[in-house]
Image (cartoon, rainbow, N blue to C red):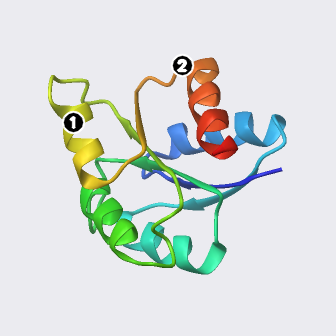
Amino acid sequence: MAKILLVEDNEMNRDMLSRRLERKGYEVVIATDGEQGVAMAKSEHPDLILMDMSLPVIDGWEATRQLKACPETQPVPIIALTAHAMAGDRDKSLEAGCDDYDTKPIEFKRLLEKMQALLKK
C-alpha cells in the first residue's frame, strides 16, 4: 500500500488521521513542522503528502513551494489540509503547487477519495 507523509503540528489531528489511514492499510510517516516535512519528503520518498498549511518553522505554502521546486520531490502529489476555508485559500494552495485541497475538520471519506484519485495517476 502507499506511503503517506502527514505534515501536521496538531497532535490530536495527527493521531486521529494517522490511525485511520493505517487502518485503511496505508503506511504513515509523520512530520510536525514544514521544515521537517520537506526533509522527510526527500528521505522517506512518500507516494503522497498531506500538508497542513498552518505549520511552525515554515508554513505549508512555503514547504509545498520548496517540494515542487525540487526535481526529486516535484512529482509527489500534495493535498493541502487547512481549517482556513476562506474564499481564495483553495486557489492559494493550488498556486503554491498543491495538487488538491481539503478542509478541516477532515471528512475522512472525501479525503480518501481525493487521495485515491491522486495515487492512481
Regarding mark 1 in the picture, which secondary structure is present there? helix
Amino acid type, mark 2: Glu
Rounded to the nearest angstrom, the CA distance separating label 2 from label 1 is 20 Å
Few, some or many residues within 10 Å of mark 1 (<14, 14–19, 20+): few
Q: Nearer the viewer, residue 120 or 34?
A: 120
- Work out which quarter of the rendered image holds the C terminus and state it: top right
Q: Which residue is mark 2?
A: 107
In the displayed structure, does residue 117 sit left or right of residue 9? right
Q: Which residue is mark 1?
A: 91
First reached walking from the N terminus: tag 2 or tag 1: 1
Q: Is residue 16 visible?
A: no
In the displayed structure, does residue 6 sit left or right of residue 63? right
Q: Position of residue 53 (x, y in %)?
A: 31, 47
Residue shown at 54% from the left, 60% from the top: 76
Marks counted in the figure total 2
The correct choice, above or below, for 31 with respect to 28 in the image is: below
Q: Nearer the viewer, residue 50 or 90?
A: 90
Q: Quadrant of residue 87?
A: top left
Q: Position of residue 19 (x, y in %)?
A: 73, 39
Amino acid type, mark 1: Asp
Residue shown at 42% from the left, 45% from the top: 99
Regarding mark 2 in the picture, which secondary structure is present there? loop
The correct choice, above or below, for 93 with respect to 28 in the image is: above
Residue shown at 56% from the left, 30% from the top: 114
